[in-house]
Amino acid sequence: MKRQLEPMRVIAGRWRGRALKCINLRDLRPLTDRVKKTIFDVLGARVEDAVVADLFAGCGSFGIEALSRGAKSVTFVEISQQALKIIAENLQRFQSQESYELVREDAYRFLKFAAQKGHQYDLIFVDPPYRLPQTDKFFHFFSTHLILKKDGILVYRHYRRETFSHIPAPLVLDQQKRFGETTVSFFSVEDDNENCHLSGDI
């Protein structure tokens, strides 16, 4: 028996209140409104004019919310063709004129390709399946490649029991928000002179 998906919507911005379609896939954990609202409350005005990468995009809830709130562009990266189709349908229903790209690819391979092309992002949202822990690999990549801008934010959604024994420089853990079995961790790139922390405590 398939689990019942919680209805999702756009919380704020030009598409506020619009319903989001989603699909029920094994490894898909839709971003609930409560979690999404907290994430964007933390990010605040950083979303406006931001270049965003939504990795393991699922139904595209994070990236679509970012576009609604004024992001400059969003790249949705998802391996499931079904999920990408749903993202496209949502954006078409909203008659989106914003800049976005749909990429069917493994998230890590996408990052390597983007780094080779010299791409950089203001916001990167990473939401891998719980059964495929890849934290160390991603952290190593972000610490050795300049794909996250120096004033950018990495948002990492993970299982609450997953802890970070070592966070390689220049990544800095700014704060965490917990929701039952889920934790959302916010990282920035350490500045040589002054850390650029988000408001709030860890």
Image: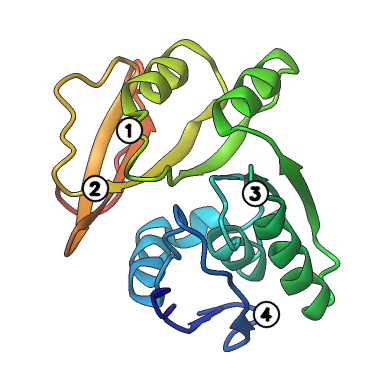
Residue 36: x, y in percent? Answer: 41, 67
Name the residue located 53 percent from the left edge and 60 percent from the top edge.
Answer: 62
Tag nearer the camera, 3 or 2: 3
Three-letter amino acid code at the position of disc 2:
Tyr
Residue 107 or 40: which is nearer the viewer?
107
Whether the residues at callouts 3 and 2 have beta carbons within 8 Å, the answer is no
Nearest to the observer: residue 111 or residue 105: 105
| Residue position marked by numbered label 2 in the rendering | 159
- Crowding at dot 2, Cα within 10 Å, few <14 / some 14-19 / many 20+, comes out as some
Q: Amino acid at mark 3?
A: Ser
Quarter occupied by residue 34: bottom left
Question: Sequence order check: which comes first, mark 1 or mark 3?
Answer: 3
Q: Which residue is mark 1?
A: 133
Report if residue 1 is visible in the image.
yes
The residue at which mark 3 appears reads as 80
Measured along the vertical axis of the image, is residue 6 above or below residue 202? below
Q: Which secondary structure, mark 1?
A: loop
Disc on res. 14:
4
Residue at figure coordinates x 69%, y 24% from the top left: 114
Labels 2 and 1: the sequence-earlier one: 1
Residue 44: give x, y in percent of width and height: 44, 62
Does residue 144 lie above or below 39 as drawn?
above
Describe the element under mark 2 as helix, strand or loop.
strand
Look at 55% across and 26% down and name the residue there.
108
| On screen, residue 161 above or below 41 | above
Cα gap from disc 1 to disc 3, whole angstroms:
18 Å
Left or right of 119? Residue 107 is left
